[in-house]
Image: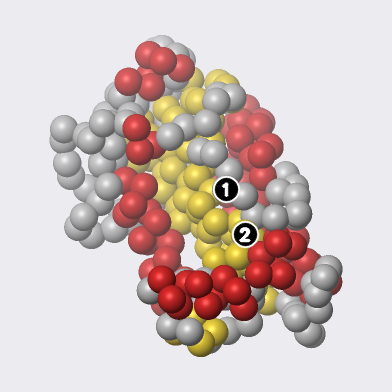
Amino acid sequence: MQFRIGVVLAFAALLTGCVGAPQRPIAFSHPAQDANAQKVGVIMTALPKSDVYTPGAGFLLCMAAASVANSTLTGYSHSLPEEGLPKLKEDVANLLRKQGLNAVVINENLDVSKLPSAKASGPDLAKKDFSSLRAKYSVDHLVVIDIQQVGFERPYSAYIPTSEPKGVVIGLGYEVNLATNAYEWYSPVDVHVAAEGKWDEPPSFPGLTNAYFQALEKGKDKFLEPFKG
């Protein structure tokens, strides 16, 4: 469990450019409504291709060995659909509308790495400057769904696998107030599902396939749960 949390926090640090302490989780709450109606945009980063991840095989020779050992599963993972994941932003927007908020879906993908670094720093402030997106998308708040890993994960210690593969969805959901560049919601998502029974059953890997689709469902639920009110 500590390893999984570390992976999520490392991705979060990479996303925000954070060098110090990781951003704390923040529960979702309605954006404050004033005399002017507040509009919420919902956007996603580009979805990664379903793949096999081998954390712990950090050196080139170890990575090559892990790649060869898992080549059949890797090829199979590339054929799996990402059912429902591309629709997450529409699902989030619909849930926000049910709560009376003016929510719009932004169709293009967000590349956070291209945003400038924020000028101000402090607790719960984004490390990237999202303020330009307020005028670009005509929204006051921006909900971001960032899915970073989809597929299977098999941890390694150098050349040696330390666990059987598991279905995995790892990502991050957050909301930024575009007037203040402050996080209003921040939630790492880390789902791992083990195969029931045998996993090493090529070419169709039925046990792992079931774990994969369970991970997708659980991952989608974790992203949507904060907006269900």
In the displayed structure image, the side of residue 170 where residue 182 appears, left or right = left
Q: Which residue appears at 54% of the width and 76% of the height? A: 66
Q: Which residue appears at 55% of the width and 56% of the height? A: 149
Q: Quadrant of residue 67?
A: bottom right
Real-space Cα distance between discs 2 and 1?
8 Å
The residue carrying pointer 1 sits among few (fewer than 14), some (14 to 19) or many (20 or more) residues within 10 Å by Cα, namely: few
Disc 1 residue type (three-letter): Pro
Percent coordinates x, y for residue 118 in the rendering: 21, 34
In the displayed structure image, the side of residue 75 where residue 99 appears, left or right = left
Report which residue position mark 1 lands on.
Answer: 48
Marks 2 and 1 in Cβ contact (< 8 Å): yes
Find residue 69 and name its label.
none
Element assignment for label 1: loop
The residue carrying pointer 2 sits among few (fewer than 14), some (14 to 19) or many (20 or more) residues within 10 Å by Cα, namely: many
Report the quarter where the C terminus lies. top right
Disc 2 residue type (three-letter): Asp
* Vertical position of residue 138 compared to residue 51: above or below: above
Percent coordinates x, y for residue 197 in the rendering: 79, 85
Percent coordinates x, y for residue 61 in the rendering: 43, 76
Q: Which residue appears at 53% of the width and 63% of the height? A: 190
In the displayed structure image, the side of residue 149 where residue 138 appears, left or right = left
* Vertical position of residue 129 compared to residue 53: above or below: above
Report which residue position mark 2 lands on.
Answer: 51
